[in-house]
Image (cartoon, helix red, strand yellow):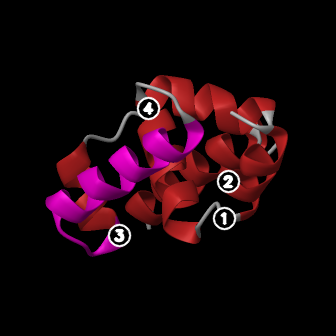
Amino acid sequence: MAHKERNSSLKSFTRYEQEILKLVANGYMDGQIADELSMSERTVKEIQVNLMRKWDVHTMSSAIDYALGNRLITIYEILESRFLKRKVEFN
């Protein structure tokens, strides 16, 4: 991927893409993600496919690696989202 295209894809990382990546990293399945984000499972899958296409990766695991490697998300954000979810469940 050309440098200019790559920078463009980094800038266009949406809030939903970020949330879905964090949830996938925490072991959520598509249906659980859909429930968590109040969207259809089909929409979740479309966002995942578009993200993988944009970053030229073939799995969500590779997308997570890409996002971590390019500092789009941090391991702390992933762990924080897991902690916040569990905190809500215990209250």
Tell me the number on the disc at residue 60. Answer: 4
Q: Which residues are magenta?
A: 37-55
Residues at marks 3 and 2, CA–CA distance in whole angstroms: 23 Å
**Number of the front mark, 3 or 1:** 1
Q: Which residue is mark 3?
A: 37
Residue 49 location, x and y as percent? Answer: 34, 45
Q: Amino acid at mark 3?
A: Leu
Residue at far bottom of view: 38
Q: Amino acid at mark 4?
A: Met
Residues at marks 4 and 2, CA–CA distance in whole angstroms: 16 Å
Residue 7 location, x and y as percent? Answer: 80, 51
Tell me the number on the disc at residue 90. Answer: none
Residue 10 location, x and y as percent? Answer: 73, 53
Who comes first in sequence, dot 3 or dot 4?
3
Quarter that holds the N terminus: top right
Residues at marks 3 and 1, CA–CA distance in whole angstroms: 19 Å
Q: Is residue 73 visible?
A: no
**Mark 2 residue element:** helix
Residue 3: quadrant of the picture? top right
Magenta stretch encompasses residue 44: yes
**Number of the front mark, 3 or 4:** 4
**Mark 4 residue element:** helix
**29 up-or-down from 9: above or below:** above
Residues at marks 3 and 4, CA–CA distance in whole angstroms: 17 Å
Q: Amino acid at mark 1?
A: Ser
Q: Which residue is mark 1?
A: 12
Q: Which residue is mark 2?
A: 9
Left or right? Give the position of 41 relative to 70: left
